[in-house]
Image (cartoon, helix red, strand yellow):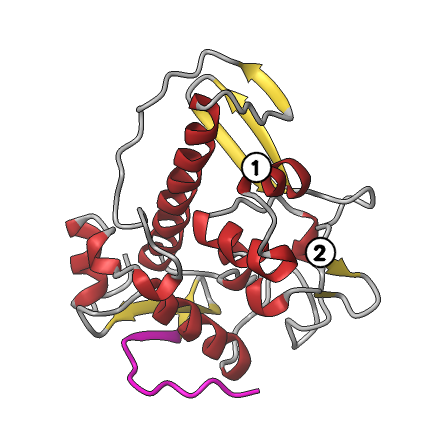
Amino acid sequence: MKYIMIEERINVFSCNINKKIGLDVEILSDEATIADYCNAMDNFILNNEFSRLRSSTNECEGCDICCKERIPLTIIDVKRLKMRLDDNLSMEDFLRRYTYVIVNSNIVDITLVIGENGRCMFLNEQLKKCCYYVDRPFVCRTYVCAEISARANKLRNYILNSGEDELMFLWQDLYEKGICIVHETLDFSFEPNKYVRNAWTGAESYEDIVLKDILPTSLWQKLRKGDSIV
């Protein structure tokens, strides 16, 4: 399947990193959204060559090595998966059934549940592919087992971390209503209102979140101007 970009707002391209074929990213438009970034990553994985670091296979499809790792979730990931599984499911029930919540002081870590086999609960083991591939979490969709430039890595991590923070707000709202969803506690000295709201607030999809609205100015400038790898 080929992804056709009507307007290319983000360019993900092959480049040489540490004597291997890796990837870099540049933002081509002030209107670029997280959805544009996800689509550009899809297009890169399907159409570009790169040196895989963890597998000898030439295709990502049918390789499930990364499906046994921690899968942090953003608020949009939860909304997409909830709609796919059962849109009538409450956020409380979704978090209880499909996530694993660890509270360590003011850090609330919310990840997708891992099955008894040590792999993602949504992995089709026969096909070695996600049962909900189109709606797979951001961290899965944007992962490539290849060398990645510093600025591309910072972009992915910043999107993920800010989306995790917004999901924490949802957890906090439930907590303040007396609904405490915790699967593991390391230090329950949680203090509300530690995090700052951002452009994720109220967003229903990745199309709603403009990268310029969530990225630090210094990182935006490195990506927008097409600076050399740093």
Asked if the residues shown at circle 1 and circle 2 are in contact, with their CB atoms under 8 angstroms apart, the answer is no
Number of labels in the image equals 2
What residue sits 56% from the left and 61% below the top?
145
Residue kind at label 2, given as amino acid type: Phe
Q: Can residue 227 be seen?
A: no
Q: Which residue is mark 1?
A: 92
Q: Which residues are magenta?
A: 1-13
> SS at mark 2?
loop
Of the residues tagged 1 and 2, which is closer to the observer? 1
Task: Residue 10: give x, y in percent of width and height.
Answer: 30, 73
What residue sits 82% from the left and 42% below the top?
116
Q: Quadrant of residue 197?
A: top left
Q: Nearer the viewer, residue 188 or 148?
A: 188
Q: Is residue 217 above or below residue 17?
A: above
Q: Is residue 211 above or below residue 16?
A: above
Task: Residue 68: give x, y in percent of width and height.
Answer: 70, 49
> SS at mark 1?
helix
Is the N terminus in the top left, top right, bottom left or bottom right quadrant? Answer: bottom right
Q: Which residue is mark 2?
A: 122
Neighbours of disc 1 within 10 Å: few (<14), some (14-19), many (20+): some
Q: Is residue 202 above or below residue 16?
A: above
Residue kind at label 1, given as amino acid type: Glu
Checking the image for residue 193, the label placed there is none
Task: Residue 123: give x, y in percent of width and height.
Answer: 73, 58
Residue 115 is a magenta residue: no
Neighbours of disc 2 within 10 Å: few (<14), some (14-19), many (20+): some
What residue sits 56% from the left and 64% below the top?
135
